[in-house]
Amino acid sequence: MPAPRPLPSAPASPRPRTGPRRALRTAALPLTAAAALGLSALAAAPASADPAPAEVSHYVALGDSFTAGPGIPEETDQNCSRSDRNYPTLTAASLSPAAFTDVSCSGATTEHMTGPQGSAPPQLDALDAGTDLVTLGVGGNDVGFAGIIARCVLLGGLDPSGEPCKDSYTSGGTDELAERVEETAPKIDAVLEGIAERSPQARVLVVGYPVILPDDGSNCHSTVPIAAGDAPWLRDTEKHLNTMLAERAEAHGAEYVDTYTGSVGHDLCKPADVRWIEPLEGVDADPVHPNAAGHEAMAGAVLGTAAPAPAPVPADLP
């Protein structure tokens, strides 16, 4: 089991990325305006409430590249392209757990939660009976994120005004991607069951995927050559994936972290100072992945879920 890392200090502003742009990795599918949350926000609520614990003993982060943060300096694990400015690290900096272990790895699928990924051991090996907070961001690679992007970009370049990628994935009379999402659901179930077996006292947060393409169904063909008719279909496929993750979380007594809603308007079609997802010519992170601002926002969503809601003010008070 990886040794827990000491609590990181709050990271400095990311340095501009230099060197050649990375090719699209086999990674997961998949806001900076997160409200600042201090330790006072995590203080115990009244006994009648069911708040998060005021202190976290051991926080473990599990997940794929949307958790690891590939392409965002500084890299802490070359094998997994894990950044020290990803949302787990930022979350840990705010929560101040006694111990923090981040085993997220680019390219991870649900299989790598219980099996090795190259030289990386199974991610669930990082859990133990003392783990009391777990974030899990996985499922996109089970659906085939990298291959979907590659096919849709290729076909979109040939038929920019049509829906060639959707046609190719539905040519058999059913939506192949919708089927993949449903086939991934029992795999998420198995991962959540494995977490519960290893860390029965842990609070588990299932983290969804942020917006990638514009939520209004538009596209930016000159930036990412996805066809006009494919853009809304791919958007709906991501929403289907997130809905499935939310349902599986609820079924297992875990909590779902919505990173999509708050990221609307920060998709890869937006200017560099607005987007939280990088386009194919990624500069501040790997292509079609969250950049540093995106991870700050995702950390805000995680913290917003992890912190207890403030106690209501009685109506008779001024």
Image (tube, grey):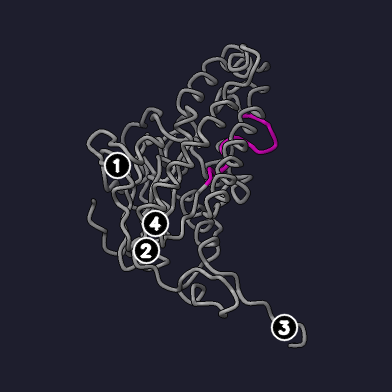
Residue at disc 2, secondary structure: loop
The amino acid at mark 2 is: Ala
User: Range of the magenta residues?
Assistant: 208-219
Q: Residue at x 37, y 63 (%)?
A: 10
Label 3 packing within 10 angstroms: few (<14), some (14-19), many (20+): few
In this rendered view, identify the residue nearer to me: 163 or 99: 99
Calculate the distance from the C-alpha at mark 3 to the C-alpha at mark 2: 36 Å
User: Residue at label 1?
Assistant: 122
Q: Nearer the viewer, mark 1 or mark 3?
A: 1
The amino acid at mark 3 is: Pro
Label 4 packing within 10 angstroms: few (<14), some (14-19), many (20+): few
Label 1 packing within 10 angstroms: few (<14), some (14-19), many (20+): some
Q: Is 60 left, or right, of 164 in this rendering?
A: left
Quadrant of residue 284 within the rendered picture: top left
Calculate the distance from the C-alpha at mark 3 to the C-alpha at mark 4: 41 Å
User: Residue at label 3?
Assistant: 314
Circles 3 and 2 in contact, beta carbons < 8 Å: no
Q: Is residue 241 magenta?
A: no
Residue at disc 1, secondary structure: loop
Which of disc 3 and disc 1 is earlier in sequence?
A: 1
Q: Nearer the viewer, mark 1 or mark 2?
A: 1
User: Residue at label 4?
Assistant: 13
Q: Could you say where residue 232 lies in the image, as x and y percent from the top left?
A: 67, 29
Q: Residue at x 57, y 51 (%)?
A: 250
Residue at disc 4, secondary structure: loop
User: Residue at label 2?
Assistant: 10
Calculate the distance from the C-alpha at mark 4 to the C-alpha at mark 2: 10 Å
